[in-house]
Amino acid sequence: WSSSPQVQANFASNLLVAFLFPVARDGLSDLLGDAWGMSALFATFGAVAVYALYFVHRHVPETKGMSLEAIERFLAGEESAASMRSPLISSGA
């Protein structure tokens, strides 16, 4: 039960991409031509994926090896990022 919202969000995202892909493909193909339209469409999806990687790297803390209590303290703001000893979060050294 606990992963139900995540699974629904994943299905909704996939459904959105599946429905928008043909519309975007046809629109960009009419605007730029067949070869450039598909290239622009895949470049757009690629740019979104690169931004998603940047966002996760920048804003999602690494919690591997941490107890649930330590994660809760960090997310509540009671513990600093430097005390997490994460390879993704630099301590300014």
Image (cartoon, rainbow, N blue to C red):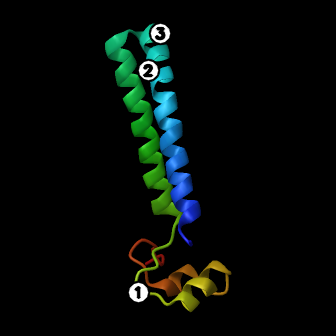
In the image shown, does 61 or 69 lie closer to the viewer?
69
Residue 12 in percent (x, y) is at 55, 46
Cα–Cα span, label 3 and label 1: 51 Å
Q: How crowded is mark 2: few (under 14 residues within 10 Å), some or many (20 or more)?
A: some
Circles 1 and 2, Cβ within 8 Å, touching? The answer is no
Residue at 45 percent across and 61 percent down: it is 57
Q: Name the residue under label 1.
A: 65
Residue reaching furthest left? 35
Cα–Cα span, label 1 and label 2: 44 Å
Residue at 44 percent across and 84 percent down: it is 85
Residue at 56 percent across and 53 percent down: it is 9
Which is nearer the N-term, disc 1 or disc 2?
2
Q: How crowded is mark 1: few (under 14 residues within 10 Å), some or many (20 or more)?
A: few
Q: Of helix, strand and loop, which one carries label 2?
A: helix
Q: Residue 31 carries which label?
A: 3
Q: Name the residue under label 2.
A: 25
Circles 2 and 3, Cβ within 8 Å, touching? The answer is no
Residue 6 in percent (x, y) is at 54, 61
- Residue 28 position (above or below residue 46): above
Q: In this view, does 21 lie to the left or right of 12?
A: left
Residue 13 in percent (x, y) is at 52, 45
Which is nearer the N-term, disc 3 or disc 1?
3
Which is nearer the N-term, disc 2 or disc 3?
2
**Disc 2 or disc 3, which is closer to the eye?**
2
In the image shown, does 43 or 2 lie closer to the viewer?
2
Q: What's under tag 3, amino acid-wise?
A: Leu
- Give the quarter of the figure containing the N terminus: bottom right
